[in-house]
Image: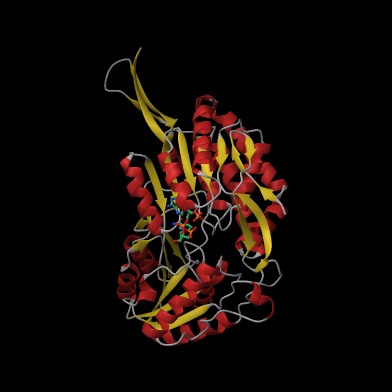
Amino acid sequence: MKRFDNYIDGQWAGGSKTFENRNPANTDEVVGVFTAGESASMEAAANAAETAFPAWSRLAGPARGNYLYKVADLLDQRFEQISEDMTREEGKTLPESKGEVRRSINIFRYFAGEGSRFPGMLVPSERERVHMFALRKPLGVVGLITPWNFPSAIPAWKLAPALICGNTVVLKPASAAPLSAWRIVEACHDAGIPKGVVNFIAGSGGSLGTALLNAKPLKGVSFTGSTEIGHWLHGEASKRRLRIQLEMGGKNPTIVLADADFKSAVENTVNAAFFSTGQKCTATSRVIVEEAIYDRFLEALIERTRQLKVGNGMDSGIQIGPAIDQKQLETNIRYCEIGTKEAGAPVVGGRRLTGGAYDRGYFFQPTIFADVTPDMRIAQEEIFGPVLSVIRAKDFEDALRIANDIPFGLSSSIQTTNLSRAFDFIYGAQAGLLTVNLPSAGVEYQLPFGGTKESSFGPKEQGPAAMEFYSDLKTVYLKY
Ligand code: NAP
């Protein structure tokens, strides 16, 4: 069985404690055995990052960029292997994994280029012969805590901007899917990134989180995960006045108006609700349908959902993989019980899939509840599985009110051919990411990513905005 160690100060670091990474589509298969980090390893990693910081931050931006280009090239050379690893550890289908690994490669190339731009500010002074400008400087040691659902892209979209800005990092991946992040760290090592610049500690977030926040050199934390852990981290980080960035839960709506292109509205809703097993932070979990087409749309949604093929993501033709683990499967089951009490039995799905190969994995039927009202728990609380609530709206205004009437604000979508309605939605929707006539999920790396309300806190990730969190401005007034 392949053993995957932690990475501290340029060395692979073993330890006496380990944990297993199992395939959620076939729990007989152990994907890898990982060294479980402890408080002492977290401290050692933060110290190594602190030691490495002066030299790395002084390196010219384009030189840091060259390292990132090398990381991208190595990931590209290992593309097939890394994609298969991801499907085996997370359960998403192989085409989905390939799409994600491609995105990670693109993210490294994009931020490698930022090393040659790294824009500051230059403005004219009111005073004679005064040259004034502001330049960007890195924060120092930053901690990156990532979830299991995009086990490669999320580590990549934190790591690449952190490094290009000149920070040194300690990365703590999700215990349910640490291998994809480990592969990126392996590529950083093989690319020759100097020792101590990138450090990787796997293991339980509960204990390592406290150790990371207590590490003296730490200057900032970027976290993606549940709202509950994000809130806790925010409280702890504030005590030390650490800079913090949080990307958390969602309950994303898709509004379908009567004038929508009907077929693509059905397809976009099914894609956003069920692909990646509904385990995307931008997945649609509420579809709000204008009354005039409600019955016809529901019927088409049910028919399309019944055609989805659930199974092992390594098999060709499979569209929906398993839940990540037993806990998430139980959450899906629990919310189907809650939904049945609130809205009646689901019109499709609602059960664990069993028999044959299904018995070895955490497979759950794509599920639809109809005639859900906005106040029901299945319409308010994040499930993070393939469970969709269909809600009736009188008209556009009613649909927008329902869409916004939740604590979260990550992504929001509308399906309409009416340009004015599209713009009313763009200006009125309370979410950080909006799509029009596209699925609510499926973002690119070149523009800012992040939400509003309870979904996010701090500067946005990705695109040029990513530099905001990982750098600070230093202002200079110079008389010549
Ligand atoms: P999670 O349970 O909050 O875990 C996220 C990360 O935090 C993992 O690495 C976890 O480690 C770690 N962690 C757990 N307890 C911690 C603590 N006390 N201190 C520090 N770190 C701790 O979330 P998840 O189940 O992995 O991911 C699903 C959630 O992520 C959903 O709510 C989803 O909406 C959200 N998400 C949001 C976005 C976004 O961009 N807004 C993107 C993707 C996912 P362990 O794995 O060892 O527990």
How many numbered dots are placed on residues in this image?
0
User: Left or right: 360 with respect to 403?
Assistant: right
Q: Which of 419 and 68 is in front in this view?
A: 68
- Tell me where residue 429 sits by quadrant: bottom left
- Is residue 102 among the parts visible in the rendering? no
Q: Furthest-top residue in view? A: 480
- Quarter of the picture holding the C terminus: top left
Q: Furthest-front residue in view? A: 16
Q: Which of 279 and 178 is in front in this view?
A: 178
Rendered view: 309 above or below 50: below
Where residue 195 sits: x, y (%)? 60, 31
Q: Which of 343 and 271 is in front in this view?
A: 343
Where residue 168 sits: x, y (%)? 51, 34
User: Left or right: 133 with respect to 5?
Assistant: left
Q: Nearer the viewer, residue 235 or 65?
A: 235
Q: Colour scheme in the image?
A: secondary structure
